[in-house]
Each structure stands twice: as C-alpha cells, then as structure tokens.
Image (tube, helix red, strand yellow):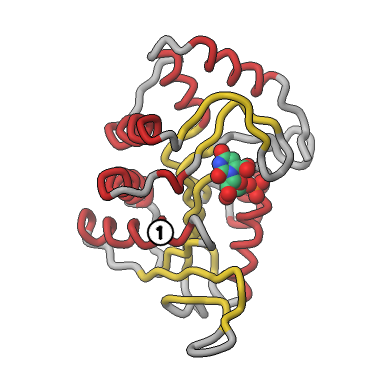
Amino acid sequence: MAATLSPSQASLISHAMSVGALKFGSFTLKSGRQSPYFFNSSLLSSGSTLSVLATALADTLANVGDFDILFGPAYKGIPLGAITVVKLFDKYGRDVGMAYDRKEVKDHGEGGMLVGVPMAGKKVVIVDDVMTSGKAIRGAIDAVRSAGGEVVGVVQCLDREEVGREEGTSTVREVEEIVGRGKVRAILRMRDLMGWLESEGKTLELDGMKEYTLTAKVRS
Ligand code: OMP
C-alpha cells in the first residue's frame, strides 16, 4: 500500500497532525460508531492551516463541471465554503457563489435559515468535513433542494470510506444514489491515511485502521 499523495494531500495531513485535527486512538462518533481515528476540521483554524485546506479543496473541485454555488452546511461547512470560493477564484479564476444555512431560524433582520447567494434554479455543490453514516449530508442535500437548488456534487475533506446503512454498500455509494454516480469527491480517503501511516512506520495506528476496515459490516 504505497502512499502516493499529491502535494496538497500531503500538506493537509501534516498540518492536520501538527494541530491535532487528525488523531488516532479510540473515538465514539456521532452515529455511535467506534472509530480508531478522528478528523476535527475545526482545529484547522489558523491562516496557514486554512490556506492549506482551501488549496486542497479547490484542487479537488477544479475539474468538477459547471456549478454556481458552493453550499457549506452549519457549522463546520461554513468556513470551508468561504475559504474554498476564494481559492477557486484566486487559483483557478472560477467565480462561484457561496451559501450556508443556520441551525436556528432567524426571526429578525433578513430572517430565514439560508444565507448567501439564493439557490433557486442553481447548480450547487455541497462542501463538508467528513461523512460517516451520511445523516448530516442528507440533511444538507434536503436544505439545498428545499431552496430550489440542484445538488450536482459533494466534496468532503476526508472520505472515511464507511460502510453504508444497507449491507454490501458504502455511505458514499448511498449518497451517490441521490446526487449521481461519481459526484462525491474528497481530498483524502481513509486508504490515503493508511498509506501515509505505513510510510511513516506508524504500525500501531495502521493496525487499528486495518482492524476497523476488516470488522466493518453494516453499521447503524
Ligand atoms: P454522519 O452524519 O454520521 O455522516 O457524521 C458526519 C459528522 O460527524 C461530521 O459532519 C462531523 O461533525 C462528525 N465527525 C467528524 O467531525 N470527524 C470524524 O472523523 C467523524 C465524525 C463523526 O462523528 O462521524
């Protein structure tokens, strides 16, 4: 399992490790799944680390076909959307809008749940940190569709390559059933992390990851 990471992937892993945004150990996930690692994108919160993340996200989106708006669901998706549209413009000359939602309805001022470019009739890509069971991303897809937008893709920081709710499938595959085959992308996949662990000689952590993939069946 050789780690052939692109410069932006390698840079993201090393920055994430240095600020504790990527940790190995034992973690209980939102879905209740027990994981040997955790990616906490909110710890990537300095100028240098966000710049690395923005470049990696923009590189991942650079070849995605036409879209009008990048939607970052509250809360962690909001900065991801903002930094990525800036980088897409600066590095690739692509000028896309950004939008995000609130967790609570605002009953004064402009009001409502949605902020940013109106999504009605627009092609929208959703950006988020990770998906495990896919519950959070399904909520984001519903939010875009309720606003009249068409979800044409999803980009995540890390594809945990989790098993799906149905036997023999993956969360990504299940989400692709909703948004289209090949439409869910990620900067990094779990196998990239495993390749990196191997190249770094971190055998204990690698064994934990292997065990996790081997014992993966249908998870709730
Ligand atoms: P699902 O809704 O089960 O797909 O979980 C996705 C959410 O879990 C993410 O949006 C995060 O809030 C959180 N999460 C992480 O931030 N990092 C991880 O490595 C794993 C999770 C998680 O709890 O599954």
Examine the rendering and report whether any part of residue 172 can be seen. no
Residue 138 lies in quadrant: bottom right
Examine the rendered structure and indicate whether residue 91 appears above or below residue 11: below
Q: Position of residue 61 (x, y in %)?
A: 37, 51
- Identified at 29% across, 47% down, the residue is 55
Q: From the image, which quarter does the C terminus lie in?
A: top right
Examine the rendered structure and indicate whether residue 190 appears above or below residue 195: below
Examine the rendering and report whether any part of residue 58 can be seen. yes
State ligand 1's quadrant: top right
Q: Position of residue 59 (x, y in %)?
A: 32, 46
Which residue lies under the disc numbered 1?
Answer: 79
Q: Amino acid at mark 1?
A: Pro
Within 8 Å: ligand 1 and the Cβ of disc 1? no
Residue 147 lies in quadrant: bottom right
Nearer to me, 2 or 29: 29
- Identified at 71% across, 40% down, the residue is 164
> Quick check: 142 left or right of 75?
right
> Quick check: 26 left or right of 88?
right
